[in-house]
Amino acid sequence: MLRLEPRSAPSRAMVWLSPLLALVITVAFGVAIFLAMGKSPLHGLSMFFWEPLKNAYSLSELALKASPLILIGLGLAACYRSNVWNIGAEGQYIVGAIFGGGVALLAGDNTSHAIVLPILLAGVVGGMVWAALVAALRDWFNANEILVSLMLVYVAQYLLDYLVYGPWKDPEGYNFPQTKIFADPALLGHLIEGTRLNWGFPIALVAVALVWVFLFRSVQGFRLQVGGLAPGAARYAGYSSRKALWTVLLMSGGFAGLAGSLDAIGPLQQLTPQVSQGYGFAAIIVAFVGRLNPVGIVLSGALMAMFYIGGELAQSRLGLPNAMTGVFQGLLLFSLLACDTLIHHRIRFKR
Amino acid sequence: MDMTASLIATTLSAGTPLALAALGLLINEKSGVVNLGAEGMMLMAAVIGFAVALHTGNQWVAFGAGAVAGALLAGALGLLVIWLNTNQYATGLALTLFGAGLSAFIGIDYVGKTLPNFQPLDIPVLSQLPFFGPALFRHHLMVYLTIVLAIGLIWFFDRTRAGLVLRAVGESPESAHALGYPVRRIRLLALMCGGALVGVAGAYLSVIYTPLWVQGMTAGRGWIALALTTFATWRPARVLLGAYLFGGVTMLQFFFQGSGMQVPSQFLSMLPYIATIVVLALMSRNPLWIRINMPSSIGKPFTPGG
């Protein structure tokens, strides 16, 4: 019989091998699904793992999709490191898009291009407001942040629905629930001619560096991680768990809101009820698969973006449901958590 | 039908899936395991229940399929959190994300299909009573079974040896282990039983409550059910009351709309979620109130001899 035995020291190799192993398991399931659907697995897998990488244009699309995932994942990693279970980034992203989009609607054709800055700032504020609700309810009422942040996702979605079906609806939009397309000055320009890549990607990379410094080189970052790992020790050292709670929630809300506003004036160019494609939830997986490490999050963000692009391609070219993306994402996290057991345990064969 | 009677009737039927799921999660939590996968499990059970009801034309087979789906997914969750000691929050979330994706994947062929109309149960004589008849006695059998279940759980936890052991496993797994009880097996069993109930709740949603399949149709009911266990402070009777309260809030929006009040429908649709937050905050404010019944080892892994 197979038995798990604790290792005397965590395996350093497994820390890196576990995500790869999880990916292998996920791919194996993918092959099984393709076979079950009567599609060629090789063809199917190429949609996910080759098409998104095959040329410069595909790579630029990958970077475009990965940027919001990386930004949101960074904030969530800070939360989870300090044991704050914010799983409502989806709502914070949507409110960021609403706030940013609201400012963008004010722009006309003659507005200065500098309006992009207030738009992004509004996005950050929007995400922070939504996350602050979670922090406040947790801090003042001791309400469980998992449930509160999640309920706020539904509230945010209805708020967005209200705006695009109601006061913000484009009168010339043939009664579709959507705002008018934002004026040119409010839109993010393309960084490279012929691609849709915009400033979101460089901003995400800068954020990676900032969060890395914050987590691993600042006293604040150290304190909140101690609070997450050893609350007792943190209390003894006089580190405030309240301060950590507010810091990480405002930070992750701000990042998610920034991502929302970047997408609104980037690829989307208007608000519709489908502003988010589940980026807030996918970013939870990004954070975990990236080992809650900013650099790892860049890689896992790219991987998750591959799943998104692959899912779209599998839909348009193979006629497979787009929900494949979600299946792969959930499977990846599930197998990662299982594989992580091998960091602290080894498998022994025993009779 | 009398307006009040109809409000009571719709409240009972809207509260039933919440109550079923929350009672299942209560069993999980009493054994010390938090199940954040509930939303995903409900979705999976909903799509499987719908498919089975469509192919067999039998609602009870559909409920059974939902229960099996819920129990199996809970078993998978259990293997990870109970034997591999993975983080209960992260693993449950993974299950929810997986369930949301896979249910949409499976359900793609079922969108737009309609089920035969499964008639509610008309209790003879009683259903003919004025007011009380339409309000209380013309429901689906599952509505009454849910009430029986809650009473049964009160009896189980307070009066039976098995219930006592289950509570001991959730309160102090170390002591239960020292007394010779197989803590991990009991937890797995509790998780799977609770999962089966969550599954029945999912199947009830897609087969009876709104007899259709739409992607993401549980609309957060799995999460609301989780919140219900907290503000019921882990008491089955309060879970039942809480579920009907929420069923009522869900129904209130239709009455607002019917009354001609000029409130945008989206704000009314927000009500159940906002109510969850508000009630959760009010209940959590008093730590004593919460802790007095909370299973002490909730969310914590246990390794025998570890």
Image (cartoon, coloured by chain):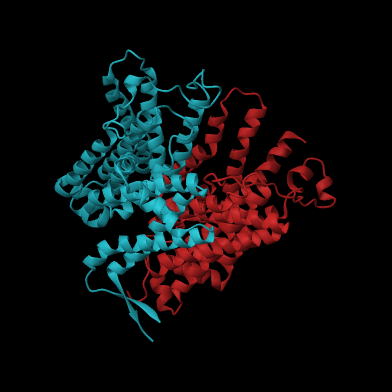
Q: Colour of chain B?
A: red
Quadrant, the N terminus of chain B: top right
Q: Nearer the viewer, residue A156 or B167?
A: A156
Chain letter matching colour cyan: A
Report the residue that reaches farthest toward the bottom.
Answer: A351
Q: Nearer the viewer, residue B261 or A58?
A: A58
Horizontal and vertical percent position of residue B162: 55, 72
Report the residue that reaches farthest toward the top.
Answer: A110
Q: Residue at x 23, y 37 (%)?
A: A202
Q: Is residue B231 visible?
A: no
Q: Residue at x 41, y 46 (%)?
A: A308
Horizontal and vertical percent position of residue B214: 59, 45
Q: Quadrant of residue B134?
A: top right
Horizontal and vertical percent position of residue B287: 40, 50
Q: Nearer the viewer, residue A111 or B182?
A: A111
Quadrant, the C terminus of chain B: bottom left
Horizontal and vertical percent position of residue B42: 55, 54
Q: Is residue A48 visible?
A: yes
Q: Judge from the rendering whether residue B61 lies leftward or rightward of residue B172; answer left or right.
A: right
Q: Judge from the rendering whether residue A257 lies leftward or rightward of residue B280; answer left or right.
A: left
- Residue B179, compared with residue B163, is above or below; it is below
Q: Residue at x 40, y 70 (%)?
A: B83
Q: Judge from the rendering whether residue B153 lies leftward or rightward of residue A14; answer left or right.
A: right
